[in-house]
Amino acid sequence: MPPTSLPTAGFDPVTPTPDPARLPTDAAGSTHLLQLGGLPPAAVRRLLERTRRVHTLMGETASLPLSGPAQAPAGLRGLLKGRVVANLFFEDSTRTRVSFSVAARGLGAKVIDLTSVGSSVSKGESVADTAANVAAMGADALVIRHRASGACHLVARTLAALRPGRHFPAGRRCAVINAGDGRHEHPTQGLLDTYTLAEAHGRLDGFDLSGLTVAIVGDVAASRVARSDIAAMTALGARVVCVGPPSLVPASLGALGCALSNDLDAVLPDADAVNVLRIQFERREPPAGATHTPGPAAVVSLGEYARLYALDADRLRTMKPGAIVMHPGPINRGVEITPEAADSPRSVVLRQVAHGVLVRMAVACECLGVSDF
Ligand code: NCD
């Protein structure tokens, strides 16, 4: 640990709490959502059940305006009134950032948006220092996206070490919510993907996914979405098969409890859902300032990759009736998926995005101790 770092205290994101349906809470009483891997199935189910209640209260047609005083319907309105949610996005984002903001604003929270550009991160401040400063100003929750795997754990451990009465007012809590850290996890995306899968296959009662097969296709090795999906979906009984060339789907992924395949055409006819991932080139570059040279290219040729693994109209026809097409976005049309597949009646891509707001409302309430619904 470099001597210039803030102190950190032990915080284990998966140590079961006395109630296995609850997220881990640190010694100061702050509840964090750092990852889905290792959480008891009851904790995953509880977040999905809360999402379902939000969904019912929001109604099928209700939507929140993106600007102005967004108002959720009665039952949800004002649940986070007086609370401050800080979005600390040190990496680019469209869907995740907007939907965390819409969710928190819709529940009445004040939202602070911070990015690397325009904050002191561009002057060399560490993510832990930036986060501690924003927490000291009174944020109740930090929603963090960072290119380094483990950044959210580091922040949670840093906050847990800040002494009440000295660094923080006594009794102050601050939740950390992981909005995507490096290749590690993206837990709210995992929850919204799982919710969308359950909805499409009539599994919203109890979220029992047994008997369903989900194919995750593409750059699984670099994907935090895939790790969260695998954790949540297998915890609830689904079978997950990761599909791609060996460079993107290495054998080591089998340790996550999923099956592996290099043959999309063999897997597709058995899949109840196909979740397509883009090749995440930027997560394969060395970090700025690193002296080592980049590793081998992700794929030999994009054309060859598309021929073997792109979800296109021909492959769509081999899928089961009722099987769905998912994609976390951003979509690279013509590489991992063609417009025919992305926009087909099987596609639930925009439904995933809409569910993102519901999941983030449920997660914000859970982490901030709001239990009114
Ligand atoms: C993903 C992410 O950022 O990890 N996108 C998202 O949050 N919806 C997937 C990706 O970057 O490919």
Image (spheres, grey):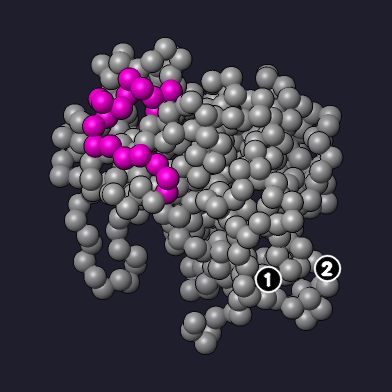
Location of residue 47 (image quadrant): top right
Residue 149 shown left or right of residue 283 in the figure? right
Judged from the image, the secondary structure of the residue bearing numbered disc 2 is loop
Residue 132 percent location from the top left of the image: 65, 70
Q: Which residues are magenta?
A: 256-278
Q: Amino acid at mark 1?
A: Ala
> Which residue does the numbered mark 1 point to in the structure image?
160
Residue 268 percent location from the top left of the image: 32, 24
Residue at 20 percent of width and 52 percent of height: 297
Residue at 49 percent of width and 33 percent of height: 238
Q: Amino acid at mark 2?
A: Gly
Query: Which residue occupies the extreme bottom position in the image?
Result: 3
Q: Are marks 1 and 2 in contact (CB under 8 Å)?
A: no
Residue at 61 percent of width and 30 percent of height: 207
Depth check: give the residue in front, 272 or 127.
272
Depth check: give the residue in front, 370 or 205.
205
Judged from the image, the secondary structure of the residue bearing numbered disc 1 is helix
Location of residue 283 (image quadrant): bottom left
Q: Which mark is residue 171?
A: 2
Give the answer, above or below, for where 24 lies relative to 198.
below
